[in-house]
Image (cartoon, grey):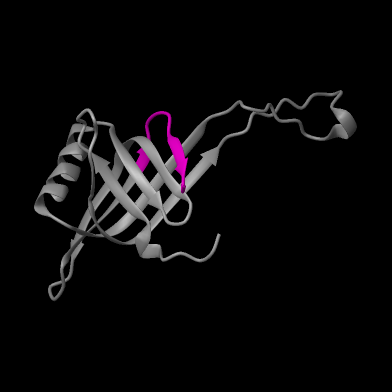
Amino acid sequence: MTAQRGKDLLLKIGDGDDPENFTTIGGLRARTLSLNAASVDVTHSESDGGWRELLAGAGVRQASVSGAGVFLSDEAGEAVRALFFAGEARNWRILIPGLGQIEGPFVIANLDYSGAHDGEAQMSLALDSAGALSFTGVA
């Protein structure tokens, strides 16, 4: 994979309709996507050479997304705020340039607002996966 522009990593929120429509929530200036998998250790006294053994396909997988920037519209800001206070899971789509997209349910784990007296209002948020995610590669 060649180098890609960081600004092309997009975070989109679903509207819950069928079919679902996704809208970019903001101009994120910094963003991170983390995928994690907890392993299950099944090492025992007769493990070959005393090497650790892991149970394939077991454990818990989890994704988290964080970003900071500015909302693109009042509607996007209101949708994110309402989801946070409702504690609802909503489908989100994360577009990864040159790789593909990850889509599925996330909850807003953190929502911050900030701003300087001589600048724009900013936001930062963190999402935690709340169910199965799908990955679609670039065609």
Question: Quick check: is 97 in the magenta stretch?
Answer: no
Q: Residue furthest right?
A: 49
Residue drawn at (41%, 66%), measured in percent from left and top? 5
Q: Residue furthest front?
A: 139
Q: Is residue 4 left or right of residue 53?
A: left
Task: Tell which of 100 and 85 is nearer to you.
Answer: 100
Residue 17, position as x, y percentages in the image: 19, 30
- Look at the image and give the residue range highlighted in magenta: 127-139
Residue 56, position as x, y percentages in the image: 67, 28
Q: Is residue 99 above or below residue 106?
A: below
Rendering quarter of residue 104:
top left
Count of numbered circles in the view:
0
Rendering quarter of residue 105:
top left
Q: Is residue 64 left or right of residue 92?
A: right
Q: Is residue 32 above or below residue 81?
A: below
Residue drawn at (16%, 49%), measured in percent from left and top? 76
Residue 125, position as x, y percentages in the image: 29, 50
Residue 112, position as x, y percentages in the image: 24, 53
Residue drawn at (28%, 32%), measured in percent from left and top? 89
